[in-house]
Amino acid sequence: MTEERARRRLFGAGVLIGLMAEQVVMFSVPLLIFQHTRQVSSLGLAYAVEWLPCLLAYPFAGLLADRDGGPRLFSRANIARAVVIGCAVLICVLQPSWTTPTLMATGALLATLVAPIRMSIEKVVPQLAKGADLARTQSLVQNMELLAMALGPGIAMVAVLSLGKIWLLGLACALFATAACCWLVLPREAAAPVAADARGVRATVADLGLGWTLLVRNKPVMLLAGLNFAINLVFSTVLAANAAVVTDVLKAPESQYAMLNMFVGVVGLLNLLLTPLLLKKLDVNFLGSLGYAVLCGCLLVLGAASSFWLYAVAFVVAMSGVAYFNIFNRTQRVKAIPREHLGKVMGPFFLVGLLSYPIGGLLISTVGATYGPQRLVAALAVLLGVYGVVFMPLTIRSFREKEVSRVGAGVEPPCPVGSETFREAMAHLAAPLTVVTTRDAAGRRWGFTASAVTSVSMSPPFVLVGLSNDSSCREALTESPEFVINVLGEHHREIADRFARRDVDRFAEGDFGAWPDSGLPYLTDATAVFRCTTADRIPMGDHQLLIGELTGLRTHGEAKPLLWYQRDFRAAGPAAPAPVPAPVPVLASRTAGNGGEPR
């Protein structure tokens, strides 16, 4: 439980710090370019140049995320972003006349590295959240983006007074490096073995083709990609011209330009608190539709605003509309894409959705420069509203039809019970504790405390062990041909606690012997010891199921078993009379003919 919370905090910290660094860059670079050129068309061109290479990177980033699992790719991409920013700072300081082309090139490189970052997050979120927790975790990620819009510019406003805009990029460099460190300790998801020849050019092209094929054949996800494209097209024109509109058209000072993003971040913090409550009251489809409608209305106001404060309010509320739509967007697409192909499909999906970014930049540099950026935004907002009236209901209906077809085909829909609720219920199930041990090819001993151990067959004798994908012993146990189950008695509490921790030498106390012919470690005074040959390994959710065939057995006297109950060690003994429970509704069993009763 503690490890899971720690992983989620590191995940969230890495995402938030990386997003803050992006906001610092987005605050500094447009202002620097506009100050050097004083042309709206330069901002639009920079925006287009920035996003074109990013689009090409997304399909390849999706393949890398599928092969890597996410955490390592995230860390490496953030380290690369830190290096790029550091080089840009040096060039701008040593050659000030190169500032504009350097910043344009830096923007393109940073945008390219956004692709592996986003794909890593897409890959890791389903590993951390299941069922009802998925929408809440996706809303957390979405609102972190808004929160970063407050923290990033807020840091920038304070730092720019003493550092200057160029050295703000140095601050972004440090933040990117910190974000990389947060994910270094996150466990990588177990991936299917990839043969050496499966990483060649031909195999890569085949995987890219498979991703496009799966996307095109997935009707609801394709419709969703269309909605993303339409929203991003309009919003990219707003973002591309934001610095010029605020500081030139509306004559607001640079400090108010930074405050604009800070206001968005403050609202993001409020949404962070409000969204879990909304998800309890509102269907995610309704929340997405509401967000789309709010966005369209606010974009019209942005196109007509003549004062900074009206523009600021509309911009902040529009970003909240985007946040609510994206909760729907993120949640539904993950449900409709096979997990093993998530990266392959999400790469092309992002490419389609973000193709509008360079188009938006080009529109600002051409149409916006001629007729004014606000008029362009207003016209696109009207078209976006008409598009949504037609395609938003079609998309929602298509996702519902796909879910019905999955159930009809015998594929279970996501469990409506959240992981926290399930964990609370399982705390009422007392489980005997064991220590599962093995020895790797290098002779190193491995072991962990396990409660998910049971017999599977009496003749021949088979046992089952549940092994978390996050366990430090996972690699050793899945590769070793043998393992040992040591049954603990009530006098083994210290051993159970020791083998449940990561910060100790679990075998330091000398209470384990070695099986004579194999060197397999076993607890010398265990109540019972089962030596097993690994017969099968079955991936199951966030665990691996190890099936072992019994090949050896030792017993050691009588002792009360050590149990794990209500998140604490317990010894078996007389129990107090249980209170009479209040009547509860009877839930229908999912097993036909079972009637909801134990079998």
Image: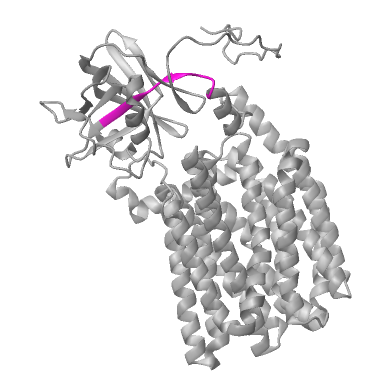
Coordinates of residue 472 in the picture (x, y in percent)? 35, 41
Can residue 60 be seen here?
Answer: no
Magenta region, residue range: 427-437
Residue 566 is situated, as x and y percent measured from the top left of the image, at 52, 25
Q: Depth check: 257 or 508 in front?
A: 508
Residue 455's place in the image compared with 119, above or below, is above
Which x, y percent locates residue 112?
51, 66
Left or right placement of residue 511 versus residue 94 in this view: left
Q: Is residue 429 magenta?
A: yes
Identify the image quadrant of residue 75: bottom left
Q: Nearer the viewer, residue 404 or 149?
A: 149
Relative to 283, say whether 522 is above or below. above
Task: Where is residue 375? Give x, y as percent.
Answer: 84, 72
Depth check: give the residue in front, 350 or 123. 123
Q: Residue at x 33, y 48 (%)?
A: 198
Q: Report whether 471 appears left or right of 104.
A: left
276 part of magenta stretch:
no
